[in-house]
């Protein structure tokens, strides 16, 4: 009788222990699922392995969660990659024909097929990892650039591209009548797509011939109107023009406009370039340009142009401000 009672007690204790183990395994599996949902794949993998250790066996549920967790880590860990290959093979072999897990079986099959693209040796795996790191860095740089572009675009909206009342995007009919006091409305210059590398068909309104004198040329110097839309695609204005000297005035005008540009768009978004050219034995040209680094938003620029003729002709200076969505490809 004593032996029977002892046996029953032991059986009860074992049963309770098994129930406790099953309950703990259930909790750990739930923790594994929660970790996976939070993209904490290493914790998910660790928890599901604890579940299998407690139960001393695997199941379709535990193996599936283990496989999809390993898949997220396999691109950076060769040991996990190898283990993932093994687990996929075991899962496909063990649970083939189980209709209750058809969707998950299909997913594991696809993971298994995708693993064939990964190197079989650790050395080759690390080389592939370096290439992936370069790709991720490039993608990160693109995201950062897009964010910077968006920031510039927002600043651009708060800094209207308007020169003497002419704004990029406005209808040609809305151009102020004062613009035609200087620009030729009746004799525009045709700019077909491809001409000088231009990216669209435009009409260019330029100063009237009779007004093209050094001092008189201060003011609007050009308006591009896109033929397809009839809207202004670009506008430029000469803020300062001087002959036989005036370099100090030109430089001061340029610096003032650039300071305003930097204030609105941020100094880090403005790029300044310089170009020195020898035109003849005596004549040379100097160009200094301030432009937005991101010209996908708009081609906004300030241009200082100084031509030195030498002798009695002295110098000719000009400072031009330009807003444009027209692009010119290099020929």
Image (tube, rainbow, N blue to C red):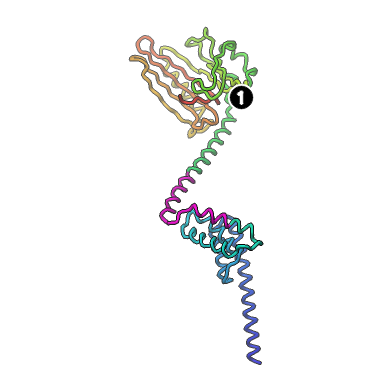
Question: Looking at the figure, which quarter contains the N terminus?
Answer: bottom right
Up-down relation of residue 113 to residue 137 (above or below): below
Question: Looking at the figure, which quarter contains the C terminus?
Answer: top left
Q: Position of residue 256 (x, y in %)?
A: 48, 24
Instruction: Assess disc 1: are there few (<14), some (14-19) or many (≥20) residues with their C-alpha within 10 Å of its C-alpha.
Output: some
Instruction: Judge by depth and name the residue closer to the eye, 252 or 192.
Output: 192
Q: Which residue is mark 1?
A: 169
Up-down relation of residue 109 to residue 290 (above or below): below
Residue at the farthest front position:
97
The boundaries of the magenta stretch are 108-137
Q: Residue at x 62, y 66 (%)?
A: 27
Q: Residue at x 57, y 33 (%)?
A: 153
Residue at the farthest bottom position:
1
Up-down relation of residue 217 to residue 127 (above or below): above
**Could you say which quadrant of the image residue 242 lies in?**
top left
The main secondary structure of the magenta stretch is helix
Q: Position of residue 152 (x, y in %)?
A: 54, 33
- Determine whether, in the image, residue 258 is placed left or right of residue 184: left
Q: Position of residue 12 (x, y in %)?
A: 65, 81
Number of marks drawn? 1
Residue at the farthest left position:
281
Q: Residue at x 61, y 72 (%)?
A: 21
Q: Is residue 110 magenta?
A: yes
Instruction: Judge by depth and name the residue closer to the eye, 299 or 240.
Output: 299
Q: Is residue 115 magenta?
A: yes
Q: Position of residue 30 (x, y in %)?
A: 62, 63
Up-down relation of residue 89 to residue 283 (above or below): below
- Determine whether, in the image, residue 56 is placed left or right of residue 120: right
Q: Residue at x 38, y 20 (%)?
A: 277
Considering the numbered disc 1 on the image, is that residue within a helix, a strand or a loop? loop
**Could you say which quadrant of the image residue 225 lies in?**
top right
């Amino acid at each position: 009788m004593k032996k029977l009672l002892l046996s029953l007690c032991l059986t009860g204790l074992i049963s309770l222990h098994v129930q406790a183990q099953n309950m703990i395994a259930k909790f750990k599996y739930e923790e594994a699922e929660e970790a996976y949902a939070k993209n904490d794949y290493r914790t998910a993998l660790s928890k599901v392995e604890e579940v299998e250790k407690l139960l001393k066996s695997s199941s379709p549920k535990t193996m599936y969660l283990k496989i999809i967790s390993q898949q997220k880590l396999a691109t950076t860990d060769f040991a996990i990659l190898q283990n993932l290959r093994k687990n996929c093979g075991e899962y496909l072999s063990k649970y083939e024909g189980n209709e209750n897990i058809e969707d998950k079986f299909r997913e594991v099959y696809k993971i298994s097929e995708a693993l064939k693209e990964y190197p079989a040796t650790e050395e080759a795996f690390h080389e592939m990892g370096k290439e992936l790191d370069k790709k991720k860095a490039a993608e990160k740089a693109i995201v950062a650039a897009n964010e910077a572009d968006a920031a510039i675009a927002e600043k651009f909206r708060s800094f209207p591209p308007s020169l003497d009342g002419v704004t990029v995007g406005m209808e040609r009919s809305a151009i102020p009548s004062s613009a035609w006091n200087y620009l030729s409305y009746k004799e525009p210059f045709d700019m077909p797509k491809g001409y000088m590398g231009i990216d669209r068909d435009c009409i260019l309104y330029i100063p009237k011939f009779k007004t093209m004198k050094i001092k008189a040329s201060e003011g609007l110097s050009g308006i591009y109107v896109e033929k397809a839309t009839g809207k202004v695609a670009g506008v430029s204005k000469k803020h300062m023009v001087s002959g036989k000297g005036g370099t100090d005035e030109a430089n001061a005008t340029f610096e003032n406009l650039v300071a305003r540009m930097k204030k609105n768009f941020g100094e880090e978004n403005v790029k300044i370039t310089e170009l020195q050219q020898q035109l003849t034995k005596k004549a040379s040209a100097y160009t200094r340009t301030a432009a937005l680094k991101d010209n996908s938003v708009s081609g906004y620029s300030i241009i200082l142009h100084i031509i030195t003729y030498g002798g009695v002709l002295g110098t000719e200076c000009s400072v031009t401000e330009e807003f444009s969505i027209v692009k010119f490809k290099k020929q």
